């Protein structure tokens, strides 16, 4: 029996309600099988959400399942199962955890493995991968797990955006990328129509896209409240409150969640609530997925007067008007423009600061807006494609911006064997002492 | 006279320094599983050396990874900050500190005795004193001799394994093929220095560079590290006590800051009594 860590306390009641949200998403996949709905093995942040929702396809989120296993400290059996078939420990542990679970479920003829966290997720009717610049495993992950579920069709949707080139002009090629993404999404629709045996309702798709846009705006407006000093909500909570945006985009319940969260934060500010009292230092979670089994570390920061009013991670949206999206009547083209511009809208700012990059520019923007004194990165060893550039980001930030204190934490998203609480807290303590010295120098 | 004590509970050694106007006592003892008991014992001996009683101490700061297990300490401060403070008092020109401890290694950038930035390796034994300890044991060479012997090598025997366990196996097999011990030790020191240098280069390394911790007592490692940075590295007279010295000086700073406002810092109130996890 795996040790289940006591849940961390959260500052907002909205965040406290998120586990029910996550469990609801997992149970929806099981209910879908009873109701005759189609289940898609799906992966987050790739522009496919509206298509699923408009076609009543229930997503079975691979990353969410593995994250739950990690948070419950119950991932090891699945990691070991995948490892037994030579999946390396250095692969993405979201993928290996979920693949191990799939392997077990297939050995049981599709029945749920005993003790699957929160009832597990259902066997999919289709698997929708995604090749894009953020994360490479989602290209191969569905193909790898198809080896164990040979009757389940796979579609890999490619959503690329112009890569950063300080010497090039991305505006010249943007439309080409949008056209490519739009066609990819159109092929995805055809694939889903074939599996579901029904046609896309294009008006319904347009309505879900509009709902997503509204949710993006509301999310940013809500999170902007965290600029308040002292901050009423920090990243420890945001690692929960990102769930509706990330896993339930294009649903009314996601929108309603942020309506409630915004009202709650406004009330907390009115009541003078503070995550840390006194709030001594404000720091940004600048990159990296968290160790889901060690979210309590945010409380450790808080207990020492350190708060995270902002994070880059899971802030997967932007104010729509800021993206200046061209008008189109094609909802798929709108999704494609929104996708491409989300990634490229820091490119121009980065060009204005010699030596900077879009990712660094984004961090600088947040440091300024949220009045941060320091920067924390988490380098998760198995999440290679995203985390590989963290050291470069840290060095660039110091070079082009200022010599701000930076902490690089090391661990993993799922694999607890990478984690040592005492050493982690020791690093945090040393970082806080560095923050103190920095603030003294700043006067 | 005001006296300040620093207690550094490292992974392998416990160090105590007592400061008055000058260093009144410094003591080093092995860290065992019973940190509290050992801290008491080393502190008692240091007090004897300084001809002081516990009540003579004005303020006590504990540091090192076992700092929370020093009940009689008034404050806990990380070894990163204490090393910076201690080093600055000994070698004021130093801007980069490399601390090679028993179970971790660190790089620290300092400015006027304050920490600007730091990096740590606490994930892997390779690149720490523990790696050298294991290899010394495998080769049957006393730990305090491996550095000197490595400097007599005719060539550096390349050690390809970066994992401590596999490196040990590689060393044993290379020994069987007749590779001289000195060459193997030179290879091992070069491998450790390479790993530490890769870690420390994550900082914007600026000279002077100093080495502290147990690793600084190994001349072979200090030379190997120097070759990685293309310069001679500085070593304080007793590199093991830098953290404890820094802790004592931090205690003095805290006391002076309070005194300047007509106040006294709060004390833990705990006495120097034997305590153990096993009672």
Image: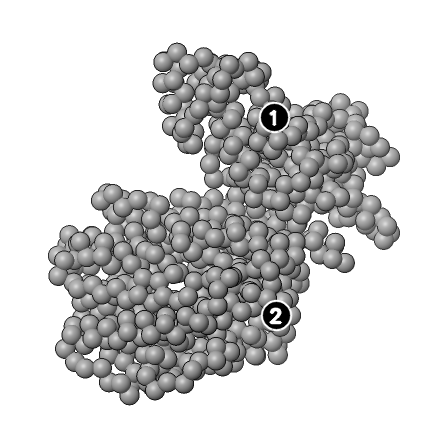
The answer to whether residue B124 is visible is yes
Q: Residue at x 41, y 85 (%)?
A: A327
Q: How was the colour assigned to the protein in this rendering?
A: one colour
Which type of secondary structure does the marked residue at label 1 adopt? helix
Describe residue B238's horizontal placement relative to residue A347 as left or right. Answer: right
Residue drawn at (33%, 82%) of the image = A331
Q: Which mark is residue A147?
A: none
Marks 2, 1 in one chain: no
Q: Are marks 2 and 1 in contact (CB under 8 Å)?
A: no
Q: Pointer 2: what residue?
A: A369
Residue name at image x 27 percent, y 56 percent: A140
Image: A116 above or below B117: below
Answer above or below: position of B188 versus B108: above
* x, y percent for residue B273: 66, 33
Q: Secondary structure at mark 2?
A: helix
Q: Kindly report the distance in space between the C-alpha atoms of the residues bearing marks 2 and 1.
A: 45 Å
A431 displayed left or right of B18: left
Chain at numbered mark 1: B
Residue B65 visible in the displayed image: no
- Rendered location of residue A45, percent (x, y): 37, 67
| Res B226 quadrant in image | top right
Q: Chain of mark 2?
A: A
Q: Neighbour class for label 2 at 10 Å: few (<14), some, many (≥20)? A: few
Front residue of A228/B149: it is B149
| x, y percent for residue B258 | 81, 50
What residue does disc 1 label?
B222
Number of marks drawn: 2
């Amino acid at each position: 029996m795996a040790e289940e860590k006591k849940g961390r306390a959260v500052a907002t009641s909205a965040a406290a309600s998120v586990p029910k949200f996550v469990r609801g998403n997992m149970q929806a996949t099981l209910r879908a099988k009873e109701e005759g709905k189609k289940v898609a093995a799906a992966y987050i942040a790739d522009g496919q959400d509206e298509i699923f929702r408009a076609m009543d396809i229930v997503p079975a989120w691979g990353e969410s399942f593995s994250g739950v296993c990690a948070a419950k400290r119950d991932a090891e059996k699945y990691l070991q199962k995948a490892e037994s078939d030579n999946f390396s420990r250095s692969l993405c542990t979201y993928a290996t955890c979920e693949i191990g679970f799939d392997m077990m479920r297939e050995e049981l003829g599709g029945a749920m493995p005993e003790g699957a966290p929160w009832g597990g997720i259902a066997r999919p009717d289709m698997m929708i991968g995604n090749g894009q610049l953020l994360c490479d495993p989602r290209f191969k992950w569905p193909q790898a797990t198809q080896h164990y579920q040979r009757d389940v069709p796979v579609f890999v949707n490619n959503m690329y955006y112009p890569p950063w080139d300080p010497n090039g002009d991305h505006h010249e090629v943007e439309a080409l990328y949008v056209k490519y993404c739009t066609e990819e999404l159109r092929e995805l629709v055809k694939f889903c129509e074939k599996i579901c045996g029904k046609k896309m309702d294009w008006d319904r798709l347009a309505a879900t896209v509009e709902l997503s846009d509204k949710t993006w705006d509301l999310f940013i407006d809500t999170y902007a409240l965290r600029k308040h000093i002292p901050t009423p909500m920090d990243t420890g909570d945001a690692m929960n409150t990102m769930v509706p945006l990330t896993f339930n985009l294009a649903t009314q319940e996601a929108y309603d969640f942020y309506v409630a969260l915004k009202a709650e934060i406004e009330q907390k500010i009115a009541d003078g609530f503070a995550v840390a009292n006194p709030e001594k230092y404000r720091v940004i979670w600048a990159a990296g997925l968290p160790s889901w089994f060690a979210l309590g570390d945010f409380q450790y920061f808080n207990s020492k007067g350190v708060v995270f009013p902002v994070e880059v991670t899971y802030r997967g949206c932007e104010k729509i008007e800021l993206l200046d999206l061209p008008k189109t009547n094609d909802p798929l083209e709108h999704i494609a423009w929104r996708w491409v511009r989300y990634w490229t809208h820091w490119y121009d700012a980065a060009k204005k600061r010699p030596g900077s990059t879009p990712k660094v520019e984004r961090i600088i923007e947040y440091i300024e807006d949220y009045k941060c004194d320091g920067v924390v990165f988490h380098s998760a060893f198995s999440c290679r494609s995203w985390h590989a550039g963290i050291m470069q980001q840290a060095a660039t930030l110091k070079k082009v911006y200022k010599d701000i204190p930076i902490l690089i934490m090391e661990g993993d998203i799922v694999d607890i064997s990478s984690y040592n609480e005492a050493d982690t807290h020791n690093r945090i303590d040393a970082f806080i002492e560095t923050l103190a010295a920095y603030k003294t120098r700043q006067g | 006279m005001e006296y300040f004590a620093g207690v550094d509970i490292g992974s392998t050694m416990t160090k105590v320094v007592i400061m008055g106007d000058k260093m009144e006592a410094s003591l080093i003892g092995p860290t065992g599983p019973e940190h509290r008991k050992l801290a008491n014992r080393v502190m008692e001996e240091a007090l004897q050396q300084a001809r002081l009683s516990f009540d003579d101490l004005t303020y006590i700061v504990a540091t090192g990874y076992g700092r929370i297990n020093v009940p009689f300490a008034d404050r806990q401060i990380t070894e990163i900050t204490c090393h910076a403070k201690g080093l600055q008092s000994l070698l004021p020109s130093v801007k980069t500190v490399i601390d090679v401890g028993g179970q971790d290694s660190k790089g620290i950038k300092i400015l006027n005795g304050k920490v600007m930035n730091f990096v740590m390796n606490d994930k892997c034994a390779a690149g720490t004193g523990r790696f050298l300890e294991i290899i010394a044991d495998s080769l049957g060479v006393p730990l305090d001799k491996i550095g000197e012997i490595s400097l007599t090598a005719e060539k550096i025997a390349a050690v390809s394994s970066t994992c401590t366990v596999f490196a040990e196996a590689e060393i044993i097999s290379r020994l069987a093929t007749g590779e001289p011990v000195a060459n193997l030790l030179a290879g091992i020191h070069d491998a450790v220095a390479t790993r530490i240098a890769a870690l420390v280069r994550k900082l914007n390394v600026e000279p002077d560079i100093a080495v502290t911790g147990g690793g600084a007592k190994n001349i072979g490692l200090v030379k190997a590290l120097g070759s990685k940075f293309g310069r001679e590295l500085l070593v304080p007279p007793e590199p093991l006590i830098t953290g404890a010295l820094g802790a004592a000086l931090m205690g003095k700073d805290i006391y002076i800051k309070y005194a300047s406002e007509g106040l006294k810092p709060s004390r833990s109130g705990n006495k120097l009594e034997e305590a153990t996890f096993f009672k």
